[in-house]
Image (tube, rainbow, N blue to C red):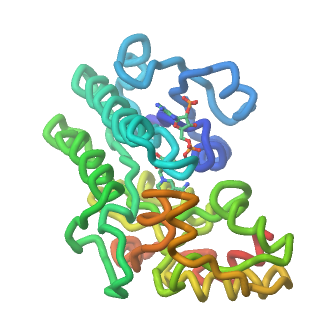
Amino acid sequence: MQKKIIIAGGSGFIGKPLCSLLTNAGYDVFVLTRSPESASKALGNSAAPLLWDAKTSGGWAREAEGALAIVNLAGESVASGRWTASKRHEILGSRLNAARAVMDAIDHAKKKPALLVQASAVGFYGSSLVDRVLDENSPAGSGFLARVARQWEKATEDAESFGTRRAVIRTGIVLGDGGALKKMVLPYRFFAGGHFGTGMQYLSWIHIEDEIEAIRFIIERKMKGFFNLTAPEPVTAGEFSKTLGMVTGRPAWLNIPSWAVKLVFGRMGAEALLLGQRAVPAALAGAGFRFKYPRLEGALRDLL
Ligand SMILES: NC(=O)c1ccc[n+]([C@@H]2O[C@H](COP(=O)([O-])OP(=O)(O)OC[C@H]3O[C@@H](n4cnc5c(N)ncnc54)[C@H](OP(=O)(O)O)[C@@H]3O)[C@@H](O)[C@H]2O)c1
């Protein structure tokens, strides 16, 4: 049985625990990284780093021959810093380049990889204050994040015509050790917790353990198609801050008005912090995936 799994961008927040999970489950895991030395330190024995330039398949394409899966997570962080023009260019460009490199390797493989798991985000559906429930059949929305997600997904849509199944994972805010939660908790430590803007915007979140288990589920069940990787109960930002206050035992009272969020975070704040989406994991639920952390309070109690 083929046991090789290649994870592009596997040295990051989702990739690290995913490598451990898959290696412990008996797979041979390789990570495509721009810096094998630091990836090796970060990953330990859970994956073998392979150098790539995140733009081409040169030097690593032969590794894709007959792989069980390629998981493509690579891309410039969306959540760090203001979305200046050059940052926006890097966010989109890095994803399109990495996706093209992966597609080139698949195209050239004599024995095609069986599956491509392509990362995307619930930002695909657009950001708003509307509380409409969004499943995988909901249409793409508008805004920068939606445009990035749409083009990112499109960049690998030909995988099936090469003979490689494709599963697109539209992930919500991943709650884990570090990542977004670390930033969200910080004000609570100083008794200054609260939400951004109206608090009516929905946050679609997922516990890191469910995120990586869902990816393993998709690989092992030989699935394809589109999957919202979000917990079944998205909450409003107001509910989120109340629950975070309860779990940390700190007050959630310092709500930051929209104008201040826009002033500090610019366009990123206006789109990613003041607006949101209410996505539900209809495809995973339909396939019988069981969430270990379906409710926010349980997820936060586990992590904090
Ligand atoms: N975390 C979340 O809440 C969340 C939610 C929705 C969607 N996602 C998506 O899921 C993917 C993985 O998320 P993550 O949180 O694990 O991301 P991450 O920690 O930022 O890691 C992504 C990896 O991509 C590589 N990378 C970073 N900048 C790059 C660039 N400019 N060009 C090429 N490669 C670059 C890095 O690997 P090397 O430095 O080793 O090359 C990095 O380890 C991301 O693309 C993200 O957009 C994440």
Quarter assignment of residue 36: top right
x then y, percent, for residue 195: 62, 79
243 or 86: nearer the viewer: 86
Instruction: Name the side, left or right, on which 114 lies relative to 36.
Output: left
- Locate residue 54 relative to residue 297 in the image: left or right: left
Q: Is residue 210 left or right of residue 300?
A: left
Of residues 168 and 82, the one nearer the viewer is 82
Q: Is residue 86 left or right of residue 231?
A: left
Please state the horizontal and vertical placement of residue 111, each as a whole percent of the image: 28, 26
The residue at 38%/25% (across/down) is: 64
Q: Quadrant of residue 123?
A: bottom left
Whether residue 235 can be seen here = no
Which quarter of the image is occupied by the N terminus? top left
Q: Residue furthest left?
A: 161
Quadrant containing the C terminus in the rendered view: bottom right
> Which residue is pictured at 59% across the width and 87% down the height?
238
